[in-house]
Image (cartoon, grey):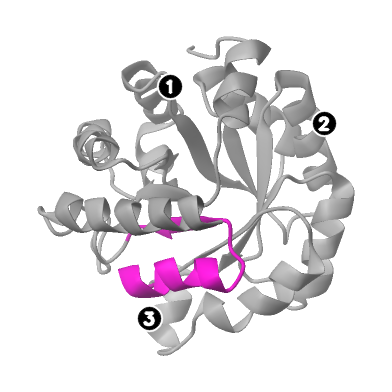
Amino acid sequence: MYWTGKSLVSIRLSKTTYPVVQVSLDVETVDKALFVAEKAVAAGVDWLEAGTPLILSEGFRSVSSLRKRFPDRVIVSDQKSMDGGGLETEQAAKAGADVIVVMAAAHDATIKEAVKYARKYDVAIMADLLAVKDKVSRAKQMEEFGVDYIIVHTGFDERHYNVGASPLSDLPDIVKAVKIPVQAVGGLTVEQAVETLKMGAKLIVVGAPLVTRDDKFDVGDERFDVVLREVVRKVKGMRLAS
């Protein structure tokens, strides 16, 4: 396990300057994740996300591998906890995650347990609003429960069945409803991802179809790092202007 105690986790998160550029490692092997992560870090990306397909395929070994290779980067564990919120948060924290994803659609007890264990290990909780009907109300509840970040999410299957579905339609209302940082994910183009910052998001996530493919869990455009560098440049410009 590569969890190194409260001080280092706190230091990594306390160094965060918004807006943040996060890359989703939605691939199926640690080797591919490290390949993408190396290029992403070289391009200046701030946070690395161990995507759900990666965790399902490789377990929390994927998180510990990212922590070992990138000791100074914030690592997000997108395990999408629906039950066992406390214990799964503990597993991810011990593997080296700084930020851990729980589903807002889960029972309130699951959210509260995740937050309780997050405080124990000094990590942060992200609540994913995927499949939640009243997203604004649930986002407010998440904040009340002590969640640290909100994800406005249009899922992989949803956007393939419902062409045109986008997290952008819900983002402005949710940003207005909560004080904690919000991100929007789900099939956004790079331009749309950057645009979310103008809508009030504090983190942008770059994944499919650039970094990973939109039809399967694999590496996308092999020259994605060129585009990522430009994204990072734009975002850093926004930091300086704010």
Marks 1 and 3, Cα distance to the nearest angstrom? 36 Å
Q: Nearer the viewer, mark 1 or mark 3?
A: 1
On residue 160, the disc is: 3
Magenta stretch bounds: 188-207
- Camera-near label (1 vs 2) is 1
Q: Is residue 130 left or right of residue 219?
A: right
User: Which of 72 and 107 lies nearest the eye of the viewer?
Assistant: 72
Residue 219 in view of the camera: no
Q: Earlier in the sequence, mark 1 or mark 2?
A: 1
Q: Residues within 10 Å of mark 2 (few under 14, many from 20)?
A: many
Position of 43 relative to 233 (above/below): above
User: Is 1 placed left or right of 227 in the picture?
Assistant: right
Is residue 164 rendered to the left or right of residue 126? left
Cα distance, mark 1 to mark 2? 25 Å
Looking at this view, name the residue that lies furthest to the front.
Answer: 241
- Which is in the foreground here, disc 3 or disc 2? 2
Label 1 crowd (10 A; few <14 / some 14-19 / many >=20): some
Q: Secondary structure at mark 1?
A: loop
- Identify residue for label 1: 72
Helix, strand, or loop for circle 2?
helix
Asked whether the viewer can see residue 22, the reply is yes
- Residue reaching furthest to the left: 222
Q: Residue at 50% x, 38% y: name it.
A: 76
Q: Is residue 239 above or below residue 210?
A: above
Q: Which residue is mark 2?
A: 116
Q: On screen, 217 above or below 193?
A: above
Q: Nearer the viewer, residue 88 or 236?
A: 236
Q: Position of residue 17 (x, y in %)?
A: 54, 41
Q: Which sits in the foreground, 127 or 108?
A: 127
Who's the residue at 76% across and 46% down the image? Answer: 147
* Residue at 45% across, 73% down: 195
